[in-house]
Amino acid sequence: MNVADLGRQPTIVVGVSPTSGSPGALRWAVEQASARGGRVVAVRAFRPHAPETATGGRVPSVVSDDSALSAEQSRLAEDVAHVLGRDHLVETRVVAGKRRAVLVEESRGADLVVIDAGHSTEVGARWLGSRLVRAAHCPVVVVPPALGDRGSSTLGAAASSFGRSVERAAGTAGRPGFQRPPSG
């Protein structure tokens, strides 16, 4: 620690998954920030979907990601509020890019990065944790699933996952390359 860091408020960055909401990571980070007089920044990586096509299969010439980015910011704020309540003091930030790259970049200004380990079926979460630990510019804490599942049921998690799948499927309907199953 150098002299410039003595009066600085510690920053804990939490990677918040769009699928699980990372409840264990959020709760753990808030507890740590409270104990250390720090602040928590909830971060979500955002990669916009391919643009929808205009009539005739042409891609629109002007595509704005502002509304998609704004919608993702709202979803992140809702996910954090769902876990911590509406009166939380966590800053939320959506950053364009891939999850690992975004968290590595955010680690540059942080004292700690916290992520959920994910469930055994979430291969991407395991890869993210392993690769993030090697590339981060500060310590990384990976919160085990048992701590993340406090307050949620298996049925609730399955219902949330199903709802997100339906939402994603609806967003891709009618796009080129999207095949409907044969009827009949």
Image (cartoon, grey):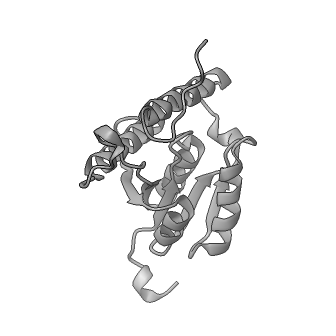
Direction front: furthest residue: 56
Q: Quadrant of the C terminus?
A: top right
| Location of residue 119 in the rendering, given as x and y in whole percent from the top left corner | 70, 41
Q: Is residue 123 visible?
A: yes
| Above or below 70: residue 159 | above
Say which residue appears at 64% left-offset and 35% top-offset: 149
Locate residue 56, reporting x and y percent.
32, 40
Q: Which residue is outermost to the bottom?
A: 3
The residue positioned 27% from the left and 46% from the top of the image is 67
What residue is rendered at 60% in x and 21% in y? Answer: 182
State the residue in front, 7 or 181.
181
Which is more toward the observer, 71 or 134? Answer: 71
- Residue at 67% across, 25% down: 154
* Image coords of residue 103 (percent x, y): 52, 64
| Residue 152 shows in this picture | no
Q: Is residue 8 above or below residue 144?
A: below
- Which of 55/33 is in front? 55
Q: Nearer the viewer, residue 103 or 31?
A: 103
Question: In screen coordinates, is 116 left or right of 12?
Answer: right
User: In the displayed structure, would residue 137 be above or below residue 142?
Assistant: below
Give percent across and percent down for residue 52: 36, 43
**Residue 129 figure quarter:** bottom right
* Residue furthest left in the image: 62
User: Going by the image, does 24 lie left or right of 18?
Assistant: right
In the image, taking residue 107 as reference, residue 150 lies left or right, namely right
